[in-house]
Image: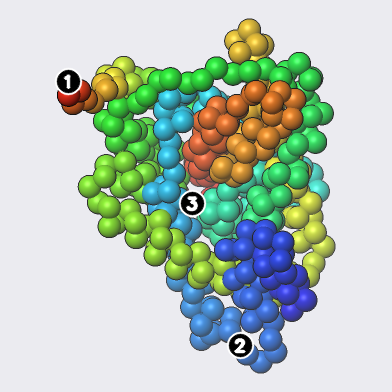
Amino acid sequence: MDIWTFGWTLSIIGMAGTMLVLWCISLLILLLRKMFPYKPEATAPKKA
Amino acid sequence: MILIGSLLLYLGISKGYEPLLLLPIGFGAILVNIPLAGLMDEHGILRYFYENGILTEIFPVLIFLGIGAMTDFSPLLENPKIILLGAAGQFGIFLTLLLALAVGFDKLDAVAVAIIGACDGPTAIYVSSKYAPHLLGAVSVAAYSYMSLVPLIQPPIMRMLTTERERKIVMGVIRQPVSKTTKILFPVVVTIFASILAPIGTPLIGTVMLGNLMKESGVVERLKTASENEIANIITLLLGLTIGATMEADKFLRGETLLVLGLGLVAISLDTVVGVLFGKLMCLLTGGKINPLIGAAGISAFPMAARVAQTEGQKYNKKNYLLMHAMSANAGGQIGSVIAAAVMLSVLTGMGIVGG
């Protein structure tokens, strides 16, 4: 494989792959947040 | 080379440029160039560290464990779409790869030079020690030096690529707290997902995420504390000293070293260019809700790049607080640099350039 085929292949797949993986991770984060939503801890009732 | 080692000591001690690394690297460079000391000879102590710590990848991988234990991904979990800036901030790696090939580096040397664009010392050390160990000294010095120069390198590029109106965009406060379960599951899910997609990068992703799991689980405080303190400190010392030991005069004093340093600067500049341009694109797509300056924080230099975005934003609008948004991009950059390296290594394996 000549250096330019190597360079362009690695660059294009590398950039697209990095973007794709991080986009998927952002979707996974949204999914986790949806499955396990934040619930504020119950606070002790104030004394009168 | 003793003078160059002394210069690194000066930069670390007097200028405060990444002293934790530049001090041992500088001293290692001095030690290895003392005539007849033989520290990198067959039975030399530094040769022992080099062969057993760097060539085996143990040192960089253990550093990742510490990084994971120190990193708080909460800003990213609160604002996940910003992670895309962390991907754009790695494009300098791949663009620099083409430049390195153009100036005559062979394939694996070009990969090692390009990885400086990860703006992440351990990643650069991991990749260069694996595929171009003869460039390890130059690549490491470039990576750590430019990381410390981020506050000087980035602002002119940020100003050049944005309009004053864009720099003044105020981003709202993020109010999306994340549950503890999400924080605990995040490192596990990312490890499984990213390692399946880019298996050869598993040592990188796995150790960062193991460190983060120890931090977020809250049940192994001793291990977490050891990872971010004792282990990270011991390995940083040995890693720096051993990198310095690779800087023997006949291997370091070459035109190639100057090219590595020059291309490293280009790589980090290109990361910033693409990050800011991607920030402008997100600004356009969101109807002006994203300040493009935070795009520059999509690199791995944490939290320095986020602080640069905050400082630049406040220069044009004193009431603008970009820090939390920039921290999200910066945390994305930390994951992005590891993912970019993992993707790169997996593609190299897939192309048959390196063994699996």
User: What chain is tagged by disc 3?
Assistant: B
Kindly state the secondary structure of the residue where label 1 is placed. loop
Kindly state the secondary structure of the residue where label 2 is placed. loop
Residue B28 to residue B105: above or below: below
What label does residue B38 carry, if any? Answer: 2
Residue drawn where x is 27% and y is 57% of the image: B222
What label does residue A48 carry, if any? Answer: 1
Q: Residues within 10 Å of mark 3 (few under 14, many from 20)?
A: few
- Residue B160 percent coordinates (x, y): 82, 28
Residue B347 to residue B314: above or below: below
Between circles 2 and 1, the one closer to the viewer is 1
Based on the displayed image, in which of its 4 quarters is residue B138 positioned? bottom right
For marks 2 and 1, give the CA distance.
78 Å
Question: Do tags 3 and 1 sit on the same chain?
Answer: no
- Residue B181 percent coordinates (x, y): 26, 30
Q: Residues within 10 Å of mark 2 (few under 14, many from 20)?
A: some
For marks 3 and 1, give the CA distance.
71 Å
Q: Which residue is mark 3?
A: B355
Judge whether residue B95 can be spotted in this image: no
Residue farthest front in this picture: A48
Judge whether residue B64 can be spotted in this image: yes
Residue B29 to residue B142: above or below: below
In screen coordinates, is B185 left or right of B96? left
Pick the front one: B192 or B121? B121
